[in-house]
Amino acid sequence: MAASDDILQVKELSKSFDKLQAVDGISFNLETKKVTILIGPNGSGKTTLVNLISGFYKPDGGDVFYKSKRITGWAPHKVYRAGIARTFQVPALFSKLNVLENVLVAEKQNPGEGFLRAPLKQLWKRPEENSTERAARILELLGLSGQWEKQANTLSGGQMKLLEIGRALMSGADLLLLDEPISGVNPTLAHEIFNTIVRLSKELGVTFLIIEHRLDIALGYVDSVIAMAYGKLISSGSPEAVISDPRVIEAYLGA
Ligand SMILES: Nc1ncnc2c1ncn2[C@@H]1O[C@H](COP(=O)(O)OP(=O)(O)O)[C@@H](O)[C@H]1O
Ligand SMILES: [Mg+2]
């Protein structure tokens, strides 16, 4: 795999909380436009890893490169403005705003024109398109076209997750880090969300790293899997290879 195909490179990333080594020398690359899930038993360090990449925690050691630029230790807003957006286990929405407004506000929050944003704009923004049109296109891709005027706090849990993804897209992000996007979502909608994620990666060229433990639903949709246990990467590769890896089976059975 050529380095130029990798949107993200994580090298020997580490983070401890007091004596607990939450992330312990993790290295991996993410190939552009691919959908990867990050799995591992509870407490294995998945959320901490996403917090390190997105700038919410500063690593004790190691490096993160986004499009070959070193972004290690950057503040969250700077990482976000560069083009990496994340969602949370509990969706972070403006509950009193409607669906369309929630998406529009995401663009206003992110007026940056940094050097890293130039390629995003070519990928995403049609020159003749205004913000509302672009928001409408995103909502259509997410299957939320009929929900424009609904106040965010009246949406179902699954729709909130989709709207959060929409906000990330509107920000211009081309790398999305999702923390358990189908947690608490019924199986039908969970499949729909993964279908949508695959469609976004194909149609918009967006790359996804998704923390997800519902493998029965997620595995059929993803290009690759990264498995963690006790802060370490224990396996990575195709879904078939990772779930049949004895180290992964042991980590799950032992948990
Ligand atoms: N801010 C923090 N302060 C102290 N310990 C933390 C903090 N965040 C996470 N941890 C600990 O780090 C370990 C990994 O947590 P986490 O990354 O949330 O795991 P996962 O997302 O895989 O369930 C856990 O033992 C957790 O208790
Ligand atoms: Mg977690």
Image (spheres, rainbow, N blue to C red):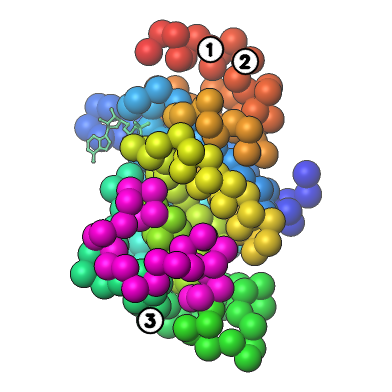
- Secondary structure, mark 2, is loop
Per the model, the C-alpha gap separating discs 1 and 3 is 45 Å
User: Observer-nearest residue: 225 or 14?
Assistant: 225
Residue highlighted by disc 1: 249
Residue highlighted by disc 2: 245
Residue highlighted by disc 3: 108
* Magenta residues, start to end: 135-160
Looking at the image, tell me whether mark 2 or mark 3 is earlier in sequence order: 3
- Secondary structure, mark 1, is helix
Per the model, the C-alpha gap separating discs 2 and 1 is 6 Å
Q: Measured from the top left, where is residue 19 in percent x and y?
A: 25, 27
* Residue depicted at x 53% and y 79%: 134
Please say whether residue 217 is visible from this viewpoint.
yes
User: Observer-nearest residue: 203 or 191?
Assistant: 191
* Residue depicted at x 56% and y 73%: 137
Of the residues shown, which amino acid type is indicated by label 1?
A: Ile
**Vertical relation: 2 (above or below) 250:** below
Of the residues shown, which amino acid type is indicated by label 2?
A: Asp
Could you tell me what secondary structure mostly forms the magenta stretch?
helix
**Vertical relation: 164 (above or below) 189:** below
Question: Few, some or many C-alpha atoms within 10 Å of disc 3 (few <14, some 14-19, many ≥20)?
Answer: few
Q: Is residue 26 magenta?
A: no
Q: Is residue 137 magenta?
A: yes
User: Observer-nearest residue: 100 or 84?
Assistant: 100
